[in-house]
Every structure is written in C-alpha cells, then in structure tokens.
Amino acid sequence: MTTKDRISGRSWAGQLHAHDRRVTRQRLAVLAAVESSPHATAEAVAEAARTELPQLTLQSVYVVLADLTELGMLRRIEPPHSPARYETRIGDNHHHAICTRCGRIEDVDCAVGHAPCLIPSSSSMTIAVADVLYQGICADCAVPAVAPVHPTPGQ
Ligand SMILES: [Zn+2]
Ligand SMILES: [Zn+2]
C-alpha cells in the first residue's frame, strides 16, 4: 500500500496491472466515478467522469465499463425496466432492493454471509451465486403524494 492508493484502500492501478491492462486516465476516471456513486448508469458515470476528462465520450465509457465488468473489477446490475447499473462492491454476494416508483437501488447484505446464500429447493446445477432483486417502495416514495400543507388540528 502506498499513499497513492484510493481512499478505499484498493489500488485501481495495481488491479489493472494484474489484469494486463494499461493504466489509462479513462479507466481511472470511470472507476472513480463508479466508486463514488454506486449503482450509477453509464450516462451518470460518463457525466461524473467528464469533470476530470471533459472529452470522454459515452461510447468510450460503455467500452471501459464492459471491459472492467468482464475483468471482475466492476459488477453490473440489470434491473427490469432500467438501464444497467455499475458498482465497485464486488465479490460479497450482496443483493439489491429497487424502488419500483423512482428506481432507487440499495444494497442488501447477503442473507447468510457467503455465496450462494439461497439454496434452491431443486436444481440439477451446482449453484455458485444467488443474485436476488427485491422490489418495493423506498421510504421517500412511501410518503403519501398529497400531504396536507397544514396539519389538521386535533390530530
Ligand atoms: Zn422511490
Ligand atoms: Zn450493490
């Protein structure tokens, strides 16, 4: 570990080297953007990364995201009716809860702490990973849409 390591304690450069990838500003900017806003879409990642690299195109962000996902440095989540999201929290078999109204995604820790945390009652396969998507309504969306402006006296 050197002082150049990211605040997370992981060295992106070291991981890229380990995968025979050149350490480019594009890759570092994308990794930093995903780390600072987990479950971001490619568009959001591009927008965040452009604060560092203004010329970065959405197309190159897609290419970098796909490559880093394939290497296992990023995890891609594909919620229904929503563009794919990316995160740097990998390898802990955590799950996701998505709000069906606003699309907010939250991490849900693995139910038993190791993969696969759910054993299917019947399957001919040897299960390695359980990836669960909980769907519900987040706390913000659970607030009634029409709230009284003034509290009713006597309540
Ligand atoms: Zn919501
Ligand atoms: Zn997550």
Image (cartoon, rainbow, N blue to C red):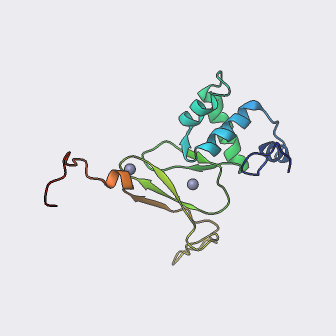
**Residue 8 in picture, x, y percent from top left:** 72, 50
Residue nearest the observer in this picture, 100 or 35: 35
Vertical position of residue 41 compared to residue 52: above or below: below
Q: Residue at x 53, y 44 (%)?
A: 84
Q: Residue at x 81, y 39 (%)?
A: 21
Q: In the image, 140: left or right of 17?
A: left
Q: Residue at x 55, y 42 (%)?
A: 40
Q: Residue at x 45, y 44 (%)?
A: 82
**Residue 71 in picture, x, y percent from top left:** 73, 48
**Residue 67 in picture, x, y percent from top left:** 70, 41
Residue nearest the observer in this picture, 72 or 14: 14
| Residue, far top | 55
Q: Assign the C terminus to one quadrant of the image.
A: bottom left
**Residue 126 in picture, x, y percent from top left:** 64, 72
Q: In the image, 65: left or right of 148?
A: right
Q: In the image, 145: left or right of 152?
A: right
Q: How many marks?
A: 0
Q: Quadrant of residue 34?
A: top right
| Residue, far bottom | 121
Residue nearest the observer in this picture, 143 or 101: 143
Q: Quadrant of residue 61?
A: top right
Q: Quadrant of residue 117?
A: bottom right
